[in-house]
Amino acid sequence: NLAGKTAVVTGSNSGIGLGVATELAKAGINVVLNSFTDRDEDHELAEGLARDYGVEARYIKADMSSGEECRALIETAGACDILVNNAGIQHVAPINDFPAGKWDAIIAINLSSAFHTTAAALPMMRKAGWGRVVNIASAHGLTASPYKSAYVAAKHGVVGLTKVTALETAREPITANAICPGYVLTPLVEAQIPDTMKEYGMSKEEVIEKVLLERQPSKEFATVEQLGGTVLYLCSPYAAQVTGTTISVDGGWTAL
Ligand code: NAD
């Protein structure tokens, strides 16, 4: 029974993070939402989850590009039975034109943040006698695409960090796994559609099928609810021996 446990989901005021936090709240899990902003609407998201699902929900501002703020997020949360490392950004450019600052930011937010939060959360999980680390990697944690050097490197790094976390906790009731989504229609992806329509002179439907879902054989987006359900499975007793692995939710992308 997961009710009453506490989950910290990084980067969860939108998209996959918010979707995962919502599914966890539906299961009675207390949730800590996070991003780097501190707006009324951020706190209102947490209030909404508390009201709708009768759980404790809080929003804690912390910038996942700072190791100290990553650790402070876990300390401020006070409890962390389930850690979902989800915060992430993207930048697309060829290596020779890739801004060094963007490289550093992507490595910090998409990879190093998971190291810092995991380091802070493992002692709490050990004290509680149970824990789940779920890292949101990507199909790009297993395969590559041109122009996404920092993102692909960071996501492969997340998969490696996941394996080490699993080995270091193998004899304890703690597991660590990575979920590798294909394309999910979040605000981030949706925002790319109008520009791509212009660039290729395509309709919205053509952009979705021929550009976005080109490598996703199902020709359907994965949903944030499906990702939340995958996190819940990893938190369930069925998954107690599932550790150090990746679960693809990508409509067949990595089978190609
Ligand atoms: P999104 O932009 O909707 O969400 C990203 C979240 O990270 C937001 O809540 C944002 O506020 C937060 N964030 C960004 N920088 C931060 C920082 N410095 N500190 C704290 N929070 C920060 O995008 P999304 O699509 O929901 O992506 C979530 C995760 O899923 C990312 O790690 C992304 O790489 C991964 N992913 C997304 C897709 C997809 O198709 N959308 C596919 C595979 C993997």
Image (spheres, rainbow, N blue to C red):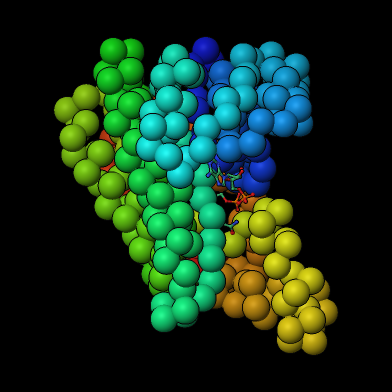
Quarter of image, res 25: top right
- The answer to whether 169 appears left or right of 249 in the picture is left
- What residue appears at the point 58 percent right and 37 percent down from the top-left corner? 36
How many labels, in total? 0
Residue 129 seen: no
- The answer to whether 23 appears left or right of 142 in the picture is right
Quarter of image, res 115: top left
Q: Is residue 151 above or below residue 49?
A: below
> Residue 61 appears at what percent x and percent y?
58, 29
Camera-nearest residue between 110 and 83: 110
- Quadrant containing the C terminus is bottom left
> Residue 55 appears at what percent x and percent y?
64, 15
**Which residue is situated farthest in the right direction here?**
203
Q: Is residue 160 above or below residue 54?
A: below
Q: Is residue 141 above or below residue 210?
A: above
Q: Is residue 245 above or below residue 121?
A: below
> Residue 70 appears at what percent x and percent y?
42, 33
**Which residue is situated farthest in the bottom direction here?**
201
- What residue appears at the point 71 percent right and 72 percent down from the top-left corner? 208
Camera-nearest residue between 226 and 36: 36
- What residue appears at the point 45 percent right and 48 percent down from the top-left corner? 109
> Residue 218 appears at what percent x and percent y?
60, 68
- What residue appears at the point 70 percent right and 25 percent down from the top-left corner? 43
Residue 18 seen: yes
